[in-house]
Amino acid sequence: MADKKNDVLRAVLHVKRKEYITPHYIRVVLTGDHIEQFADTTVGVNNKILVPPKGVDKIHFPEFDEVKNEWIQPPEHLRPVIRTYTHRGIDVENREMIVDFVYHGDHSPASGWAGRAKEGDQLGVLMKAGKRTLYPEADWYLLAGDATAIPVLGAILESLPSTARVTAVLEVHGEEDEQQLYTEAQLDICWLHNPSPEEGSKLADAVKQVQLPEEGTRFGYVAAEFSSVKEIRQYLRKELGWTAGELYAYSYWKAGMAEDQSAADRRKEKQRA
């Protein structure tokens, strides 16, 4: 249901099926009675998932207190872990929402949940209502990201017209994790292999090797670990003179820190764009 005051859609969905689309990538198909409310959202836009604590089989949402004008959290033993994810697809007719998870073991809440998930398990979803624009129209696109960015970059590729030219630089664990990505655009794709992304990345170095077009309009969408995004933004904005309107750069995570611990640093860096 939608929280009209805060323009937020929320639902408790459950696992319909899941599959390993690569050794380190799990696709979870969720279903539920309120899928139709997400029909007018944009595939590829960030949303929040609520992962229940181990041993808790229901989702306990925070509730908004209109008198105090603040969110009231559930008791700690019932409180879900909230993480930012991208819904990869919506099929209203079949009441399905697709969410892809990078699987890197059980030491993080979302990855661990996806690895253990079985049919019927519940997951909470929070998303802003309405359509969002992922990118402006351009002649040429640079898409750069690590494994966490493939859902949004895949959604962008699927929506681009055949007239668009795209250079994509994508970093995954290994060759076995390269995915088949559909697009009608003219795509030049470079896959990087990095089995230990928390220890560093060559993504920024690879972006610096991309041959940029000399004519036409351009737009870059960059999503990866904090340090990589910072270096790529510095390169494109400061060294090459790209404008703020030509680049969207966002860090989904910061090495050595959980998402909630690194949120302030990542927001601050984004504001410097």
Image (cartoon, helix red, strand yellow):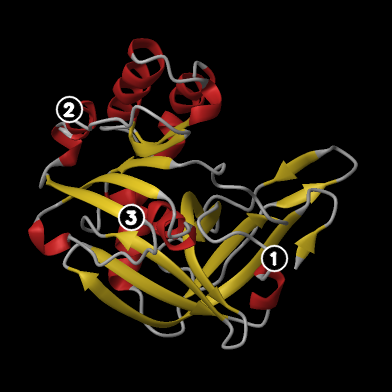
Dot 1 lies on which element? loop
Mark 1 burial class by Cα count in 10 Å: few <14, some 14-19, many 20+: few
Give amino acid for label 2.
Asp
- Residue drawn at (87%, 45%) of the image: 66
The residue wearing badge 3 is 186
Q: Position of residue 93 (x, y in %)?
A: 61, 87
Q: Position of residue 40 (x, y in %)?
A: 69, 65
Between residue 248 and residue 72, name the one nearer to us.
248
Q: Are marks 1 and 3 in contact (CB under 8 Å)?
A: no
Q: Which mark is residue 40?
A: 1
Compare marks 1 and 2 and give the one earlier in the sequence. Answer: 1
Q: Quadrant of residue 42?
A: bottom right
As drawn, which residue projects farthest toward the top? 238
Taking 127 as reference, is 59 above or below it?
Answer: below
Residue 259 appears left or right of 169: right
- Residue drawn at (33%, 49%) of the image: 148
Dot 3 lies on which element? strand
Q: Position of residue 46 (x, y in %)?
A: 53, 50
Residue 205 appears left or right of 5: left
Q: Which mark is residue 205?
A: 2
Between residue 148 and residue 257, name the one nearer to us.
148
The mark lying in front, picked from 1 and 3, is 3
Mark 2 burial class by Cα count in 10 Å: few <14, some 14-19, many 20+: few
Mark 1 → mark 2, Cα distance in angstroms: 38 Å
Mark 3 burial class by Cα count in 10 Å: few <14, some 14-19, many 20+: some
